[in-house]
Image (tube, rainbow, N blue to C red):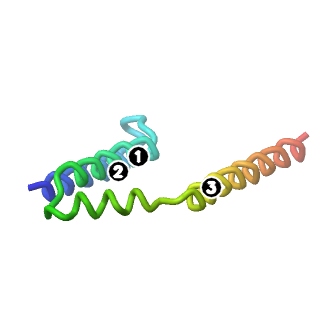
Amino acid sequence: MINTVIITLVVISLVMIITEDLIHLNKAKTTLFFGTLCWILIFIFPTTPDSASHTTEQLNELNFISYLSNVFYLIIAYTVGYIGVYFAATRSQ
């Protein structure tokens, strides 16, 4: 049952991404919303009884180093993006 619901949500999100220009909703917002909703549904309604405990264990193993590496990646990506915008703006003057 939950598999059918998740597949339906994926199809709905795909249609929303394809029709982004018509509905004026950003692809990132659609993806984040439906992706998060699917993960929450998987966690609340596991397909097997051990799935919830296994998912909880994996979430608890997320350590500080992996979190920190994601933060550094975002900082570097935004910095490179801003530098590119700055040079593009100064080159046009």
Q: Position of residue 48 (x, y in %)?
A: 14, 64
Q: Mark 3 points at which residue?
A: 68
Q: Name the residue under label 2.
A: 35
Give the residue type at disc 3: Leu
Left or right: 91 in relation to 48: right
> Does the CB distance between marks 3 and 1 fall below 8 Å?
no
Badge 3 density bin: few <14, some 14–19, many ≥20, Cα 10 Å:
few
Mark positioned earlier in the residue sequence (3 or 2) = 2
Q: Position of residue 8 (x, y in %)?
A: 18, 52
Q: Reply above or below: 71 against 50.
A: above
Distance (Cα) linking label 3 and label 2? 22 Å
12 or 80: which is nearer to us?
Answer: 80
Quarter holding the C terminus is top right
Q: Nearer the viewer, mark 3 or mark 1?
A: 3
- SS for dot 2: helix
- SS for dot 1: helix
- SS for dot 3: helix
Give the residue type at disc 2: Gly
Q: Position of residue 35 (x, y in %)?
A: 35, 50
Disc assigned to residue 32: 1
Badge 1 density bin: few <14, some 14–19, many ≥20, Cα 10 Å:
few
> Does the CB distance between marks 2 and 1 fall below 8 Å?
yes
